Image: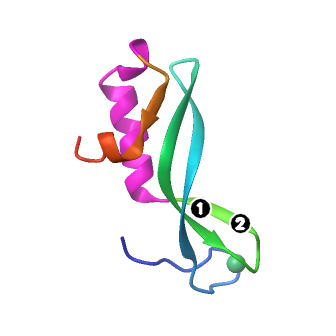
Amino acid sequence: MKIIKCLFCSKPTSINKINIKKKINGKVVTLTNAPVYYCEKCKETFISKEAQDVLIAIREKNLDKKNVLFNYEDLKKL
Ligand SMILES: [Zn+2]
């Protein structure tokens, strides 16, 4: 993953691993260990393209029908 700049202050962000909760098809799905960008100065978190892609894959493949808890590491190759 490449480092991006903060959308607010333009300082380089760091990569954090967090649990993302997202509503998909009306259900709250949790993606654990998902990489996000974090700006220490602004205390802002930005979802990464990689994590976003996994959330889109969960929705498109209807994986939420079977499960609502996913680990990013298991799904990133989808
Ligand atoms: Zn910032």
Image coordinates of residue 6 in percent, x first then y, are 62, 77
Q: Is residue 41 magenta?
A: no
To which quarter of the image does residue 74 belong? top left
Report if the beta carbon of the residue with label 2 is closer than 8 angstroms to ligand 1.
yes
Snapshot quadrant of residue 72: top left
**Residue 53 covered by magenta stretch:** yes
Q: Which residue is mark 1?
A: 46
Mark 2 surroundings: few (<14), some (14-19) or many (≥20) residues within 10 A: few
Q: Amino acid at mark 2?
A: Glu
Toward the right, the furthest residue is 42
Residue type at tag 1: Phe
Which residue, given by chain and number where applicable, does mark 2 sit on? Answer: 44
Q: Residue at x 63, y 87 (%)?
A: 11
- Please report contact status of discs 1 and 2: CB closer than 8 Å, yes or no: yes
**Residue range highlighted in magenta:** 48-66
Q: Tell me which image quadrant ligand 1 sits in.
A: bottom right
Element under label 2? Answer: strand
Q: Callout 1: helix, strand or loop?
A: strand
